[in-house]
């Protein structure tokens, strides 16, 4: 029988993983996606190449993929934390768009890669994206279950619609100033929620399940 | 086939059509200028003369021409509409149907999505949204004020791109009745709300 890993070993393994992925991000910032090498990542993380391979047997490609995955996960976590206190669906979506838009616009590395290596970067994001979309859709289904919906409205298709709208706007503001809370509030009410909630009766206050 | 083409078929159009057929067959990565010239029935020298700027510039020109061709067809369709619902449903239905039957686009979506992404992701999407919004404005403006027409035009463009490039499992927008359902559920209530609200 194999003994379960000791907690200290797991912690050290996770710590090494984190350091290597942080080093990968630093290398991408400096050398671009095309210029990332496993040797350089190992040197930056102050670990041996063997250690990097042990954690990321797929080598350089897996490093890049995991680094992107982690950054996307971080974006999602920060978004969630920023909006979890909002008491109704209107304000939660509004604040999520405000925060998400700013996070994308202010993300130095993302903007840099979109300028310098759009195809390579978007290819990575394309692989990782569906996980974020799935998480968003799942969370929206959960939230829709906590509010009073218009009659006949099904959470599944609605969550898909809201996910698509959110991702479309958070990535590209179009004609909207998504740093303006008044505009974003109007956008969320008219284009996201008008068909889903009876907004004359309320903003979709969450009641416990 | 003569190199100069006929009056009815300018050489530039023949070359761009040929490029689209090549991409539908092999994708962007494997399509060379030689392939395009051969498919167009002209020499490489002619191709360089008519469309200088290299392969990538040629493909951008081909893409633009496909879009313009689609918009011209859409205009004819929209001239036939009577109600606002008609206009919105027709735009979405025609566009999603066009995307789903465009062989080159479908090839890229399946095999080389990274070729499309730089044109439709993040800031790159804004000019495309603006172009489509401006194009559909006249028909929407028959039923809405200018600001509302622009907001709705961009909204529709976003829906077309999202549902067109990544079809939903439970919503087939190549079917007009499904589009009607989506428009009645999601779009028309928002337009009504915007009209009655006092917000800026």
Image: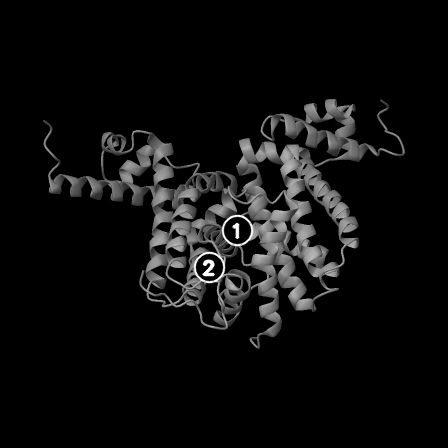
Alpha carbons under labels 1 and 2: distance apart: 11 Å
Residue sitting at x 50%, y 44%: A116
Q: Position of residue B27 (x, y in %)?
A: 60, 29
Q: Is residue B62 above or below residue A188?
A: above
Disc 2: which residue:
A101
Residue sitting at x 61%, y 68%: B192
Label 2 residue SS: helix
Residue sitting at x 26%, y 44%: A18
Q: Nearer the viewer, residue B158 or A42?
A: B158
Q: Residue furthest bottom?
A: B198
Q: Nearer the viewer, residue A201 or B196?
A: A201
Q: Is residue B199 above or below residue B10?
A: below
A9 lies left or right of A186: left
Query: Which chain does the numbered disc 2 sit on?
Result: A
Q: Position of residue B175 (x, y in %)?
A: 63, 43
Q: Position of residue B90 (x, y in %)?
A: 69, 51
Q: Is residue A27 visible?
A: no
**Residues at circles 1 and 2 in contact by the CB criterion of under 8 Å:** no
Identify the image quadrant of residue B148.
bottom right
Q: Say few, some or many: other residues with alpha carbon within 10 Å of mark 1 (under 14 / 14 to 19 / 20 or more).
A: many
Residue B122: which disc? 1
Q: Is residue B81 visible?
A: yes
Label 1 residue SS: helix
Q: Say few, some or many: other residues with alpha carbon within 10 Å of mark 2 (under 14 / 14 to 19 / 20 or more).
A: many
């Amino acid at each position: 029988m194999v003994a379960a890993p000791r907690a200290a070993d797991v912690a050290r393994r996770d710590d090494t993983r984190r350091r290597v992925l942080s080093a990968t991000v630093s290398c991408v910032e400096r050398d671009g996606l095309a210029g990332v090498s496993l040797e350089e990542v190992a040197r930056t993380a102050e670990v041996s190449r063997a250690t990097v391979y042990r954690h990321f047997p797929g080598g350089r490609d897996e490093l890049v993929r995991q680094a992107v995955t982690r950054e996307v996960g971080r974006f999602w976590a920060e978004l969630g934390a920023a909006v979890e206190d909002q008491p109704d669906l209107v304000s939660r979506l509004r604040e999520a768009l405000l925060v998400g838009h700013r996070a994308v616009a202010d993300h130095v590395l993302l903007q840099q890669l979109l300028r310098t290596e759009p195809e390579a970067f978007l290819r990575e994001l394309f692989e990782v994206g569906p996980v974020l979309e799935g998480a968003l859709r799942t969370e929206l289904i959960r939230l829709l279950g906590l509010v009073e919906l218009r009659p006949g409205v099904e959470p599944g298709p609605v969550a898909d619609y809201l996910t698509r709208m959110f991702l479309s706007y958070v990535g590209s503001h179009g004609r909207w100033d998504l740093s303006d809370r008044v505009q974003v509030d109007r956008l969320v009410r008219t284009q996201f929620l008008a068909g889903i909630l009876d907004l004359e009766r309320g903003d979709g206050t969450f009641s416990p399940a | 086939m003569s190199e100069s083409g006929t009056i009815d078929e300018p050489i530039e159009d023949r070359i761009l059509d040929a490029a689209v057929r090549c991409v539908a067959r092999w994708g962007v990565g494997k399509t060379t200028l030689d392939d395009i010239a051969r498919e167009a029935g002209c020499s490489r020298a002619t191709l360089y003369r008519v469309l200088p700027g290299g392969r990538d510039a040629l493909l951008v020109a081909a893409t633009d021409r496909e879009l313009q061709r689609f918009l011209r067809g859409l205009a004819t369709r929209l001239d036939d509409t009577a109600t606002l619902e008609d206009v919105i449903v027709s735009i979405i239905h025609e566009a999603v149907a066009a995307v789903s039957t465009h062989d080159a686009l479908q090839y890229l979506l399946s095999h080389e999505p990274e070729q499309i992404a730089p044109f439709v992701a993040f800031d790159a999407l804004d000019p495309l949204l603006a172009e489509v919004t401006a194009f559909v404005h006249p028909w929407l403006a028959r039923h809405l004020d200018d600001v509302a027409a622009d907001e709705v035009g961009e909204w529709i463009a976003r829906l077309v791109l999202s549902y067109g490039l990544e079809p939903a499992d439970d919503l087939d927008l190549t079917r007009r009745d499904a589009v009607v359902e989506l428009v009645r559920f999601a779009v028309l209530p928002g337009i009504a709300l915007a009209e009655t609200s006092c917000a800026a």
